Amino acid sequence: MFKNIFLAGLSSSIFGTLVSVAYIFVFKYSPLEADFTEKATLGYLLSLNVLIGMTTCFLYFTLIKLLKKENIASFLVGIILSGASIAIALLFMFKVDNQLVFKNENAELYKDFYYFILAPISFFSGLSWFTFKPLFIK
C-alpha cells in the first residue's frame, strides 16, 4: 500500500513541476516577455512541488494507519492540502521583497508581479495529487 501512495505522491510532484514550468514559460513567451525563470528555476519549482507532493503522500499514509478509515483520511488530507496551498499562496503574495533584482529588463519591469504570478504554483501539486491518487490508490 505504501508503494502505491508513494508513487501517487511522486507522480503528482513530477506532474506539478511540469505544469509549473509551463506556467512560468507562459509569461516568458507572452507579449510581456517577463522571464521569471531567473528566480523561478527548474530546481526551485521541482523542490516546491516535491515538498508538497511527498508531504501529502506521507500525511495520507500516516492518517490511514492512524484512523483505519480511508475515506476520512482522504477527506482530512484534502482539507489540509487545500488549506496549505492557500497559505503558501498567501505567503508568496505577502512576501514581497523590495530588494528583488532581475537581470532581464522585462522581468525587472514586472518584478512587482513576480510573487503574485508565483502564488498559483502552490495549487499545482495539490491538484496533481487529486488527479493521480485514483490511478494508484484503489
Image (tube, rainbow, N blue to C red):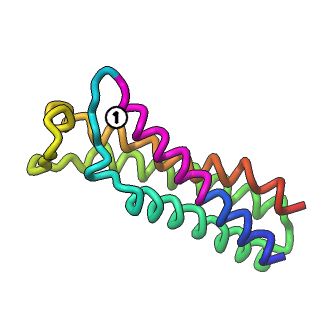
**Residue farthest right in this picture:** 138
**Quick check: 88 left or right of 105?**
right
Image x and y of residue 76, in percent: 69, 59
Label 1 is placed on what type of residue? Lys
Query: In the depicted view, which residue is nearer to us: 88 or 31?
Result: 31
Helix, strand or loop at mark 1 = helix
**Quick check: 16 left or right of 45?**
right
Give the residue number, with chain letter if any, for mark 1.
28
Q: Quadrant of residue 52?
A: bottom right
Image x and y of residue 100, in percent: 14, 49
Residue drawn at 45 percent across, 60 percent down: 48
Residue drawn at 27 percent across, 40 percent down: 114
Query: In the depicted view, which residue is nearer to us: 46 or 99?
Result: 46
Q: How many marks?
A: 1
Q: Quadrant of residue 137?
A: bottom right
Span colored in magenta = 14-30
Find out whether residue 133 is within the magenta segment.
Answer: no
Image x and y of residue 28, in percent: 34, 34
